[in-house]
Every structure is written in structure tokens, then in C-alpha cells.
Amino acid sequence: MENIQKLRKSAVGVLEVNFLGARDLAVGTRNSYCVAKYGKKWVRTRTLFATAAPQWDEKYTWDVFDVSTVITIAVFDDSNGAARHQRIGKVRVRLATLETDRVYSQYYPLLKLSPSGLNKNGELHLAVRFTCKSWAKMLAMYGKPMLPKMHHTNPISVRLQDYLRHLAMQMVAKRLERAQPPLRREVVEYILDVNFETMFSLRRSKANFFQLMSVFSVFIAVSKWFVGICKWKNPLTTIVVHVVFLKLVCYPELILSTVFICMIMIALWNYPRRPRKPPHMVTELSASELAHPDELNEDFDSLQPPHINTMLWWYPVQAHPLDELDEEFDTFPTSKPEDVVQVRYDRLRGVAGRVQTVVGDLASQGERAQFLLRWRDPRVTPVFMTFFLVVAIVLYLTPFRAVAMVMGLYLLRPPLLRDRSKSNLLFNLYNRLPSNDDMML
């Protein structure tokens, strides 16, 4: 038994969640309960009957092995013994956004997206606290890669990831159906959110595009500020910029150090404005409030897959070059039969879905850079600020030629010195930063 305990990875903290209650639930909601999932542990509160304002007051705890994870909580209504329990809403809380040993007691909106539009079904009252067991282990965990070693040495292709994810969901659903108390299949599907994100959705595409534009809005604001400097809209600011510019031209070795010092100053400026509560789902980010009903129907069309035993049913059919040319020169509206149009439509959704995924990943990477200086993760931002300060001092004291030589030799190192299973420490830290993905429906 002692050997088994040594093999187990020790927890870095404990997550406590108290399900206090709910208010303003949707009309017709009478018998409600909550389901929460974190890691491999699922919990279910008792069902409160004949009330639209349930008060559960139940507390559960989880061992935390990685703070860059999310706990998912959903509220359901059994609809007086109906065949399927109705979804009321879902909440995600990323542990990295929680300060240590602080109790967060707040109401989270319960939002439900349906083909008819966005429904606001009330609010869920939760009290959440993350307690750290060892700061040293937690900070060391930030430097570890999020993906296992096999992902780097033998990665799974994109076309198989959704398929395997859905198979795993089926296995979990069958296991929880036999648990006490049992969890229904629709509950497991909603919690795990296996929605085939690689399939195209106009709503998600617009949301990803708006995320990307929000990232680039920083560069647009800087360009407008520079235009104002050139036009002397604020003479004092313009004079200061001229002085700094002449100083950097005379002493070019200060350029890189000044950049890192400026990033530290921005982070210090944002400290009083740091988030004081965990973020929740935002309808504006999901582009769901103003979505056309046809867009929502298209979104939910991708959520209803055929039988999963049909291998790779969802992957776009590979087109013959002549077929692609025939599609390009087709008339508008089309003159082809219905079955040909159906195949082309499915293929187009698959290709557009991959483009949509790439745009979403780019937007998430940009948001991590923004949130790095906005204290979204209260532990990583001080680490990066310390790193920026050390780098600024090193760059100031070290000749630029030596820095360029070391960086060049590191980037051009031979394959024998490269290990694909071990990524860079700063790269791991950056990938663990939160983004707006958890706030989207």
C-alpha cells in the first residue's frame, strides 16, 4: 500500500464548492437538481420538489492536481418524471482564476442555447474556495506540459480526436447510469459538452472572428495613439515621446530592456483593475443574443450526430479535383441533383469547421497575451513580471551581440539536443493562462 501511495501524484490543493441555491428559474421548473464534474469525480445534489427557488446547501470537495482545469456545474429539471430531464443551464469555473484561500460567493447566470434562441433561466448561487497545500508544488506544476508525452511523440490526428472523445463520453455515460444515484445519459452529454467543435457553425465562426478582432483592437488603439502623437493632440505626451525616442536612438542597447520594463508597468497599472470575481459565461462573446434562428438551427444540426459506430462519419469527404472544378463552375442557384449538393454541403462544413477552429485557436493565444498583464491568473502574472525584470536586467548588462549569438545557436541546435516530449518552460506557462473559451456557450 505504501508503494502505491508513492506512485500516486500528490494533490496541490483542495477545491470546495457549496451549492447554496438558485433563483428566478425558468417558468415550469419545479424539480431541480445540480450535477458537478471535476476530474474523474461526479457529484449530484438531491432533487428539491415543487419549488422554483431551491436551496440545496450541500458542500463537496475535490483534490486538485492541476489548477489549469475547469469544474463544470449544470442544473437540470426532471420535469415530473419525463423521459428526458430538461437542461436549465451550465456554469464553468476555471481554478486558475481563483485566488488561494478566498471564498467566492456569487450568483452565476444560467444560460441555455436552443434552436429558438438564447434563454436566461435564472441564476445559480455558489460558494467556491480553492485551498493550496503546497505553493512549491503548485508553481512547479505550471512549468509542466499540459499534454502527455505520447502527444508529442505520436500525436493523434484531428480527424480522430472528436471520434475518440465521443467514444469516451459513451463509456462514461454507461458507467454513471449504473451509479448510485444514477445519472441519465442526457446529463452526461451536457456536462461533457461533446459537441464536435470541428464542425462548422456560423454562430461560433462569428464569435471566433469577434475574439480575433478584440485581440487586434490593441494594435488599432496603439496606431490611433501614434497618429495623435504625430498630430500633436497632446503636446506634453508628444514631447515625452520625442525625448524617449532620442534616448533610445542614442543608446540602442536600452530598447529591449525598455520593452520589458513597459510590460511590467502595464501589469502594475492593471493591478487595481484586476478581476475580483471568477468570470462567467457572456452572451456577447458567444454571438448568441443576436443570432438568427437559422444560424442556431445550423449549430444544433452539428450536435446531433448519427450512430457513432459509423467510423468518421463527420469528416469531410475528400473531393476529386474534377469534382472541385465542377463545383466551382456550377450555376447559382445550383443545377446539380440533391444528393450531390448534400455531399458538397457536408464537405464545405467540414473544411469551414477546420478554418473556424484555427481562427479560434489564434484568438485564444492572443487573449492569453492580453490576460497575462490583466491578472486573470493571479499566480502566473507575478511570475512573468519577475521574469521580465530579470530579462530586462540581463539585456541591459549583456552586449546585444552576445544575446543574439546565444539565441541563434539555441534556435539552430542539432536534432540530438531537441526533445519533442519536453516543451519550453515559458511555453508551458503561457499555455496554462486562461482565455475566454470558458465563457462561451
Image: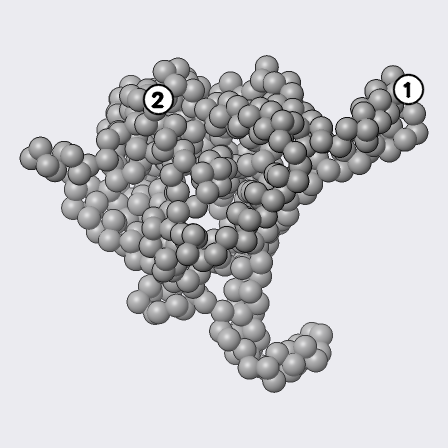
- Whole-percent x, y for residue 218 in the image: 70, 35
Q: Is residue 96 above or below residue 340?
A: above
Q: Which residue is located at x 39 percent, y 68 percent?
A: 312
- Whole-percent x, y for residue 429 in the image: 46, 36
Numbered label tally: 2
Q: Nearer the viewer, residue 215 or 308?
A: 215
Label 2 sits on a secondary structure element that is: helix
Q: Amino acid at mark 2?
A: Trp
The N terminus appears in which quarter of the rendering? top left
Q: Which residue is located at x 71 percent, y 28 percent?
A: 254
Residue 5 visible here: yes
Q: Is residue 301 above or below residue 230?
A: below
- For disc 1, the marked residue is 235
- For disc 2, the marked residue is 135
Spatial CA distance of label 2 from label 1 is 48 Å
Q: Amino acid at mark 1?
A: Pro
- Left/right of residue 33 with respect to residue 333 in the rendered view: left
Q: Nearer the viewer, residue 51 or 131?
A: 131
Lower position in the chain sequence, tag 2 or tag 1: 2
Q: Which mark is residue 225?
A: none
Q: Which residue is located at x 59 percent, y 51 percent?
A: 359
- Whole-percent x, y for residue 23 in the image: 42, 23
Q: Which residue is located at x 35 percent, y 69 percent?
A: 311
- Whole-percent x, y for residue 14 in the image: 29, 24
**Residue density around tag 1, few if under 14, some if 14–19, many if 20 or more, within 10 Å:** few
Q: Nearer the viewer, residue 114 or 244?
A: 244
Residue that extends furthest to the right in the rendered view of this protein: 231
Residue 263 visible here: no
